[in-house]
Every structure is written in C-alpha cells, then in structure tokens.
Image (cartoon, rainbow, N blue to C red):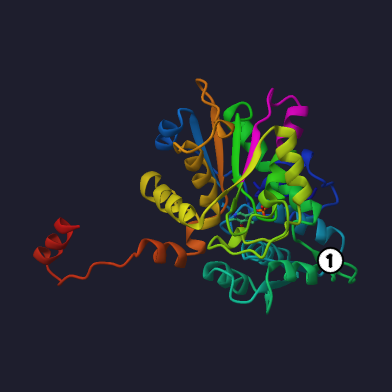
Amino acid sequence: MKKSLHDRGVIARYGAFLPVSEATPVVSLNEGSTPLIHSPKLSERAGAEVYLKFEGLNPTGSFKDRGMTVALSKAVERGATTVICASTGNTSAAAAAYAARAGIRCAVILPAGKIAAGKLVQAFAYGARVVAIRGNFDDALRIVREFGGVEGVAIVNSINPDRIEGQKTASFEIIEELGEAPDLHILPVGNAGNITAYWKGYREFQAAGRSAKLPKMVGFQAEGAAPIFRGHPVDPHTVATAIRIGNPASWEGATTAIQESGGGIDIVTDHQILDAQQWLASHEGIFVEPASAASVAGLLKRLSPEATQADSLPRHKGAKIVLTVTGHGLKDPEAPVKHGGFVPIEADADLTAVRRVLDKS
Ligand SMILES: *Cc1c(COP(=O)(O)O)cnc(C)c1O
C-alpha cells in the first residue's frame, strides 16, 4: 500500500488485517485511534468497569470514517471516478469527505426531510451532489443498489464489504487498549454493519492470539425501528435518525454476531435515548448524537430494577463493558434542544442581574 509518512489512519495501523496491497492508494484522514474513555459513574452503577469508545471523534464525527478510508482506497484502486451511497446522514458525510480527499465525485441519495442538519451541511460542504428522494432510507438503498453495474461507479454503503473491513478496526483498538476483549460490548444497531464488523474484528484478533476471550455482543435498536428485535421489516420511526432503518442490510451478520457471542438484541424508547444522551453529556462530559446514546440507554435499561434475569450483566470483579458511542452530538443539535427545552435565561447586562439569575437556577 502506498502510504505516506503523514498517514496515521486505520490502514497505516492495521493494513495487515485489511484487503489492501502495495498497489492500493491510501485515502485517509487519520481516522480511528479514538479514545476509550472510562466512565466512573456508569461503572459505579453497573458494578463493572464501563468504557465508552467515543467514535464521534473521527474526522467527520462518526465511526463511518473507518470503513470509508478502506472503501475509497479500494474504489480508487479499481478505477472508480464516482462513489455513490444511500444515507441516513453519517455515511454521506464520510463518503463526501473521503471522495474530496481522493479527488473523485460523490453522489448521495437521502430520504427527504429525514436528515439531521449537521450531517446534511457536511455532505454539501465536502462537495457532494445531494439528491433527496421522496421515500425512506430503504428506498434510497434500493436505488443505490441499482447503480451496481454502472461503469466507474462504486457503491460505498455498508453492503460494500470494504466498509465492514475498515470498521472492524475499532475492536482491534479496544483489545490493544484493554489488553484483551471486554466481557460485554454494547452498541446501537441500524443497518447492522457495525455489529457485524466489531464481531469480525474481535474474532480476527482472537485468532491472531491477541485476546484470549470474546465479548458478548448486545445490540440496541430504537423501539420504533426494531426489525431485528421483532423478526420482520418495519416502517421505521425514531428520533435517532442514524438508526431509523426498517430492513437492515447486514441483518444476517447481526444475527451471527449475536448468536455466536451469546449476546442479544433489545430495544430502547426515544425517551430513554434522549434521557441517556443528556445524562451522558451532563454527567461525563461526553456529547453524542441520539443514535449513539442508544447504547447508554441500553445499559441503563439493563441496570433498572425491572430488568429480568436473562438480561443480567457481567458483574464479577474486574468485568469490563464497552459501549460504542457512534457519533458526535453536534451532528444533530435539534433533538436534544427540543427534548431538554434548552433556552438561555435572559438578563440585563450587569453583574447583579446575572448573579440574580444564576442564584435562582
Ligand atoms: C451508522 C450509524 C449507526 C448504525 O450503525 P449500523 O452499522 O448501521 O448498524 C449508529 N450510530 C451512528 C451515529 C451512525 O452513524
């Protein structure tokens, strides 16, 4: 692979585990190497060590960058001049950024009116052609699939296996940081590419002798967009736009990860998601987008008194739980503002007035 001295991205770090060769031109923005942040407050509540893998600190603000560096590098290697994707927002932001970096065109197909403001502005800013269709994400993906045979066009949705390859590197980083895999890994599930990728990564590092154990994989879907939990496709509704998916592209991969690991799939309500988002920001200083907060909401759900025996968490001494928080809170400022009723308190422009207001709140 042709990598420059400046490249510190996931291909530079884990190229030996990725489908790249000397001939692959590396398209990177130094993605990955995101912090695994210990959460004292969640650890105390869980009776285990809880860590947050903060994927919102990738170059475009979500984990999608890990897959996109591999997808774009391979697309350029194969001679693509255009990449195309359907997106709930973050895939388009990442595709547009990496296409800009590679100097090729990017087209994104979005469900009209269903994309968070921060993500839409990214696609435009990075120079993508943006098409908003009157339909949902699943319609957008169907159209993109139909571009499959077109000369010079590469599809960079997670149905592209290069995306899954890149995304699995998050598991490698977690194992390197903790010295082994955690006991339990919780993450939000939309198209289910990420849970598929994490499981692949954990298994590959175990096979390479880097971790003696494997984690249980537990995915959380939004209650109104829970096809895997319910066992059939649905018409998806949730405030968490990144997981508003009715018919996941990687359904099978998710099922495999859950069954092989002895994990599970569960749901959280929009209310639980937005509460968890606000709790995490105000108690641990980590602001994530609503979809990302599904993993925190999921852990809190399992800690609640109503949780059944089957939901039990690893609680032996030193048990480790990792939650992936998939995207940055600034991606979608509208939802938390509405939920929290966030408005500044107005005051006259003098110290006494400001102090009076602060003392009251
Ligand atoms: C894409 C995305 C998800 C869902 O990941 P899947 O691989 O589709 O299951 C969750 N959160 C954020 C922020 C995302 O961008």
Q: How crowded is mark 1: few (under 14 residues within 10 Å), some or many (20 or more)?
A: some
Residue at the outermost top position: 317
Amino acid under label 1?
Ala
Q: Is residue 24 visible?
A: yes
Horizontal side of residue 118 vs 71, given as left or right: left
Q: Residue placed farthest to the left in the image?
A: 352
Q: Which of 231 and 90 is in front in this view?
A: 231
Q: How many labels does the image show?
A: 1
x, y percent for residue 150: 89, 71
Q: Position of residue 27 (x, y in %)?
A: 72, 56
Q: Can residue 168 be seen in this view?
A: no
Q: Where is residue 146 in the image (x, y as percent from the top left)?
A: 85, 70
Q: Mark 1 points at which residue?
A: 80
At a point 77% along the width and 28% down the height, the residue shown is 208
Question: From what the image shows, is residue 83 above or below residue 263?
Answer: below
* Relative height, residue 294 to residue 126 (above, below): above
Q: What stretch is highlighted in magenta?
A: 201-219
Q: Regarding ligand 1, which quadrant of the image does it lie in?
A: bottom right
